[in-house]
Image: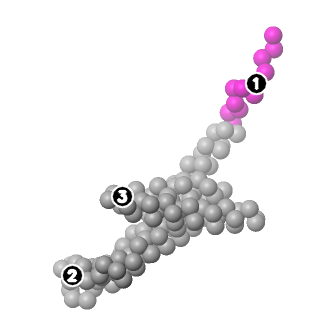
Amino acid sequence: MEIERRTFFISVVVVLCLTMLLTLVPVWQLVIIPGIIAGMLNKSLKYGVLSGFIGVTLSWGIYVLVGVVTRNAYIILDQFGALIFGEGFGWLILTLIILLAAIFGAMGGGIGNGFMTLINAYLENHPFRDSKTKSE
C-alpha cells in the first residue's frame, strides 16, 4: 500500500512537470499525454485516473492563475464571456478551462492504465522467446 501511494505522488509530480512543459506548445490537446503517462505509472485505475486528474488540473490552474495575475487574462476571459453569455461571465469561462483540464487529465489516466493492463495481460500469457531453452 505504501508503494502505491509513493508511486501516486511521484506520478502527480511527473504529470505536473510534463503538463507545465506542454503549456509551451501551442497545441493544447497534447495535455492528454501526461495523463496517459500517469495512468501507466500507477497499478490501479483509481490512482491512475486520480493522478492524471490532479496533475493536469493543478498545472492548468497554476498556469491560469499566473496569467490572471501577471497578464490580465481575466479581462480577455470576461470579454469572451460577455460575447457568449452576457456581462460578467468571465468566471464561467475560467471554470470551463479548469473543467476541461480535469476531464483530459482523468481521461488520459484511464487510457494509460487500461493500456498498461492490456500490455501486462499480454506479457503474462506470452512468455519471452529468450526464456525458452531449446533441447539439442
In the picture, which quadrant includes the N terminus?
bottom right
Q: Is 63 in the magenta?
A: no
Q: Amino acid at mark 3?
A: Val
For marks 2 and 3, the one nearer the N-term is: 3
What segment carries the magenta color? Answer: 125-136
Q: Pointer 1 and pointer 2: residues touching (CB < 8 Å)? A: no
Q: Is residue 4 above or below residue 132?
A: below
Which numbered disc, 2 or 3, marks the residue closer to the eye?
3
In depth, the one of 36 and 72 nearer the eye is 72
Please identify the residue farthest to the right as the structure is shown.
135
* Quarter assignment of residue 83: bottom left
Mark 1 belongs to which amino acid? Lys
SS state under label 2: helix
Amino acid type assigned to the residue bearing label 2 in the image: Gln
Query: Is the residue marked by circle 1 packed among few (<14), some (14-19), or many (20+) residues within 10 Å?
Result: few
Counting other residues with Cα less than 10 Å from the Cα at mark 2, is it few (<14), some (14-19), or many (20 or more)?
A: some
Q: CA distance from mark 1 to mark 3?
A: 46 Å
Residue at 67% over, 61% down: 7
Secondary structure state at the residue bearing disc 3: loop
Q: Residue at (25%, 89%) from the top-left corner?
A: 88
Which residue position holds label 1? 132
Q: Main secondary structure of the magenta part?
A: loop
Q: Is residue 93 above or below residue 17?
A: below
Q: CA distance from mark 2 to mark 3?
A: 25 Å
